[in-house]
């Protein structure tokens, strides 16, 4: 049954190595190379969201041959705005990390 109160945000939305037709939702400037679920959770919290559920053993439908992951957020704004805010925090967090 569809849950209309929550939004699912997949890791593949922010993966810089994927083309848009394979599931990336943000521009390459707002994406990172191979994000982890922990990074996604931290970026979502930094953007002001509280993930309700996480799963790292699932497969994104467009890449069913690779394990991915997702977080579930309560619906408060549009999904695209939420993804954009999370992407900005993810890039900022990745830029601060030492290489």
Image (cartoon, grey):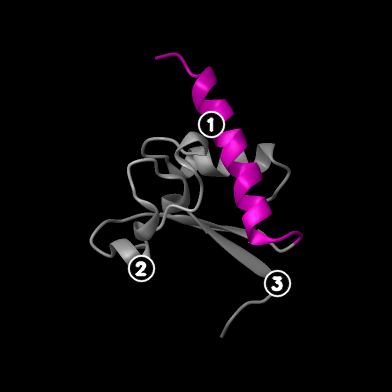
Q: Nearer the viewer, mark 2 or mark 3?
A: 2
Q: Earlier in the sequence, mark 3 or mark 1?
A: 3
Asked which secondary structure carries label 3, the reply is loop
Residue under the point 23% across and 61% down: 65
Q: Which residues are magenta?
A: 76-99
Vertical arrangement, residue 34 with respect to residue 18, above or below = above
| Quadrant location, the C terminus | top left
Occupied quadrant, residue 21: bottom left
Mark 2 nearby-residue class (10 Å; few <14, some 14–19, many ≥20) = few
| Quadrant location, the N terminus | bottom right
* Residue 37: mark: none
Q: Earlier in the sequence, mark 2 or mark 3?
A: 3
Vertical arrangement, residue 92 with respect to residue 45, above or below = above
Measuring from the top left, give residue 63's x and y in whole percent: 29, 61
Viewer-side residue, 95 vs 19: 19
Chief SS of the magenta region:
helix
């Amino acid at each position: 049954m569809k849950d209309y109160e929550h939004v699912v945000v997949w890791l593949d939305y922010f993966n810089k190595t994927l083309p848009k037709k394979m599931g990336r939702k943000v521009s390459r400037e707002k994406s990172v190379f191979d994000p982890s679920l922990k990074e996604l959770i931290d970026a979502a919290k930094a953007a002001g969201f509280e993930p309700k559920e996480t799963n790292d053993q699932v497969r994104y439908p467009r890449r069913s041959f690779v394990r991915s992951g997702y977080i579930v957020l309560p619906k408060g704004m549009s999904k695209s705005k939420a993804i954009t805010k999370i992407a900005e925090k993810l890039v900022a967090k990745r830029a601060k990390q030492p290489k």
